[in-house]
């Protein structure tokens, strides 16, 4: 079990082909449903971060991105809440940076 998580993470981070990354995501989805205890370790947090980044960087098409999102969702349900909250905060910051935000009172009033 200890060797599987780093191997999947390596496949996501370093694989050149979309097929390998999609297969790694599918593997995580299956393992989350069949062996959830496998991902309730601290090494799963790095895999969660890996999928988080992969969702933003995936250029292989909508199907591959959906598979990464699904793997991220399956894994986040098993990881520590603190890790998930940190990534949610990063996602909010990225969204605000990309789309603007309404934290500015002048912007809120103008809209």
Image: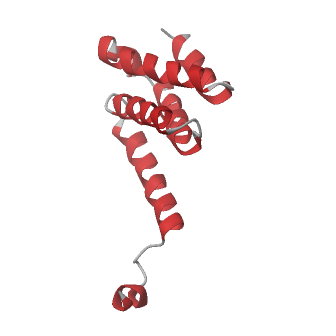
Q: Is residue 9 above or below residue 80?
A: above
Picture quadrant of residue 28: top left
Where residue 7 sits: x, y (%)?
59, 15
Colouring: secondary structure
Picture quadrant of residue 39: top left
Q: Is residue 94 above or below residue 81?
A: below
Number of residue marks: 0
Q: At 53% across and 12% down in the image, what residue appears?
A: 4
Tell me the quarter of the image containing the C terminus. bottom left
Q: Say left or right for 18 vs 75.
A: right
Where residue 109 sits: x, y (%)?
34, 91
Q: At 51% across and 59% down in the image, what residue appears?
A: 94
Q: At 33% across and 28% down in the image, what residue appears?
A: 78
Where residue 84 sits: x, y (%)?
39, 42
Q: At 39% across and 14% down in the image, what residue appears?
A: 38
Q: Say left or right for 79 vs 61.
A: left
Q: Nearer the viewer, residue 1 or 52?
A: 52
Where residue 102 sits: x, y (%)?
40, 77
Q: Is residue 56 above or below residue 49?
A: below
Q: Nearer the viewer, residue 97 or 1?
A: 97
């Amino acid at each position: 079990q200890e060797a599987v998580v780093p191997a999947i993470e390596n496949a996501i981070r370093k694989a050149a082909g979309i097929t390998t990354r999609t297969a790694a995501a599918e593997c995580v989805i299956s393992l989350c449903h069949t062996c959830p205890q496998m991902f309730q370790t601290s090494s799963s947090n790095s895999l969660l971060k890996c999928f988080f980044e992969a969702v933003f960087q995936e250029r292989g098409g909508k199907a591959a991105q959906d598979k990464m999102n699904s793997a991220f969702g399956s894994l986040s349900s098993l990881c520590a809440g603190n890790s998930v909250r940190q990534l949610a905060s990063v996602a909010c910051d990225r969204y605000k940076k990309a789309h603007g935000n309404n934290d500015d009172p002048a912007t809120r009033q103008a809209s």
